[in-house]
Structure formats: structure tokens, C-alpha cells
Amino acid sequence: MRMRVRTILAAGAATCAATALVLVLAGCASVPLGPAPIREVATVSDTMSCPGLIPDPLPGAGLVPEDFDAVAVVECAGGVTREDADGVIAGAEVVRYEGDLTEFLDAMGAPSDPGPAAVCSAVAYGFRPLWATDAAGRFVPLSFPLTACGGPKEEEALAALARLDVIDRTFSGAERIELREATEAGCATRAGVAPLELFGGTSPGSSPLDGVTGARVCVYRADAPDAPDADADAGTPVVMGEGGVFDGVFSLDAASAGAVLMAAAAPPGGAHCAETASRFVVVHPRIASAPEESHPPLTVELDGCQRIVGTDFQARRAPAGLIPLLLLPPR
């Protein structure tokens, strides 16, 4: 999550050293520069979005307008997970609070602190998205009063919020992050075009087939492949990225696994391609006398450009006979 880092250097800092003896007990940073900044009135809207924890106040956020009769507070919490029969889904939860809003709205409407007379520490701030809503279903995004260094003064407001009644919680799933079927099969739930590192540590004169007894093949399908970048360098392969979701698993025997490894050991070539794969496999070699996790997997695109992608971000074109070996057998 991108966070804004605020560093404030006030002109008063230049006088701090000169008046150190006078201000030694109070501290130079305790001398304000002037009045607190004026807080804006929030924009009324018929809708709200749910961005989760954010690095800045919501667009249009501010004080509740005087003619807006708030009846509830709505909070959006991102990064929430829920378990279902198939695994775990990540998403957002919208929480509605009701009750006497006076204490909460008073804390949110407090003035910000005046600016400091010394350098503020570099701090990353996160702002919880909160809205006030009225009986007509309209919303106003709320902003916290700020500290002298630009952080949210949220302790009193959030304590008051916690004392309100939670009337409703609505979870909206956005992404499958764990499939029990994948975990039980020893595969990742989501994957991209994995790096090919298998041959980086091979000793001189050794063969990629030495000790190969087979392989586990995890199959993935794309959620929504991104369009290729038309301005991409001709030497850079276009790959699907992290859009693959587990779709099955099967095993290769020693001969078939060896054919995949030999193809991956070929010189790079055919890297540039305008197609994007919608299906790919991650091949986990099994090698005698070595734990499987010690051998990094390799990835083969099943459609699109049908490439094997290496750690150098160069690609090897998969031989014509290789793809049929890597298709998920009918269930």
C-alpha cells in the first residue's frame, strides 16, 4: 500500500538553536507557527466506495454539513478474509454503526493542531474510510482532525465509534486467496509465470536429466489477462503476471518430466510475442536424493505464445510436442 510520507520544515526551526537556552524546558517544537488550518465541509454524495485503509483522506472528505442530519456512521474495512467450503476469500467489509453520534461527530469535528516550529519525523499515515449517512441514504466522507505533523487525530473519535452499536456487517468478496484443493495438492492457489532457476546451479558437465524421477504439474487459468503492452521492448516476453488461479494438478513420469527440463535448458529464443496466455502450468521437478522444495519450478504457457520463461526474463519457445504433455488429463 502506498503511503504518503510527510516531512515539515518550518521557518521557525532556524531560530531554534539561537533560543535553545530559553526553550530548553519547553522544546522548540512546542512553539506554534500560527492558527490551525481551516477544515473544509464534506461533499454530499448518493454513493460510497470501499477502498480500505488509505494514505490520504477520502476525496471530498471534511466536516459534516450543518444541514446534514446524520443517523449512522459507515466504515469500510479492507483486507478482510472469510472462510467458505472451498477455502478463503479476501475482500472488504462495510460496517454500519448507529446510536447517539454526538460524541463521535464532536471528536471528528475538532480543529486540527497548529503547525510545528521544528522538523517533523518522517511518518507514514493511514486513514480509515468513514462516512456519515442520513435517513435518505446520502453519504458524506469524513476527515479526521490532523496533528501538527499531518497525521490523523483519531484516538478520541475511534474510541467513540467503538461505543456505538454495530447494526450491520456486509462482506464483499474480491479475490480467492486460498483453495483447499490446491493446498492439499501441494500447489499455490494463485500463480504467475514463475522464474526458471533450475539450471543456474548445475555443475559443469551435468545433465538437466540427472536424477529426475518425475514432476508435479499445477495447472492455472487466467482470471482476466492484461492486454500486451504495445510499447514493450522487443526482447522482453509478454507474460500473464499474477492472474492465474489453480485449476487442477497431475503428475509426469520421468521421461515426460525430462522432456520439459530439456526444453527449458535450450538457448533463449522467440521471446517477443503479442499474445497473452490464458492458461499455464507450473512444473515442480522431482529429483532423486533431494527435497522437492529445493528445486525451483519452471513455467510453461499452454496457449498464447507457448513459451518457457526464465529468470533472465528471456523466453524459450516450447517445442511442438511439449504442450500435449502438459495438458490436464480429462477428469
Image (cartoon, rainbow, N blue to C red):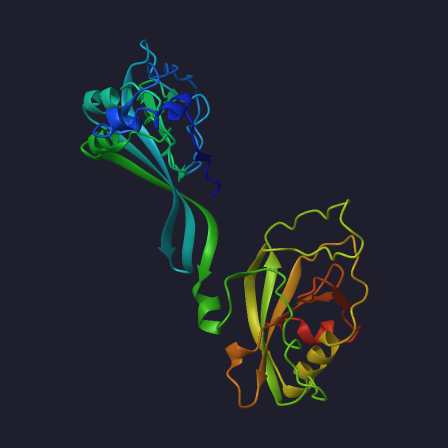
Q: Quadrant of residue 258?
A: bottom right
289 in relation to 124, above or below? below
Q: Position of residue 262 (x, y in %)?
A: 73, 80
The C terminus: image quadrant: bottom right
91 in relation to 176, above or below? above
Residue at image point 47% right, 54% down: 176
Of all residues, the one furthest to the top in this rendering is 67
Q: Quadrant of residue 138?
A: top left
Residue at image point 37% right, 16% down: 37
Disc tally is 0
Taking 65 as reference, is 56 left or right?
right
Q: Nearer the viewer, residue 180 or 313?
A: 313
Q: Position of residue 257 (x, y in %)?
A: 66, 81
Taking 53 as reference, is 190 left or right?
right
Q: Position of residue 270 (x, y in %)?
A: 81, 63
197 in relation to 234, above or below? below
Q: Nearer the viewer, residue 199 or 331?
A: 199
278 in relation to 67, above or below? below
Q: Nearer the viewer, residue 178 or 315?
A: 315
Q: Position of residue 301 (x, y in %)?
A: 69, 64
Residue at image point 37% right, 32% down: 120
Q: Quadrant of residue 273?
A: bottom right
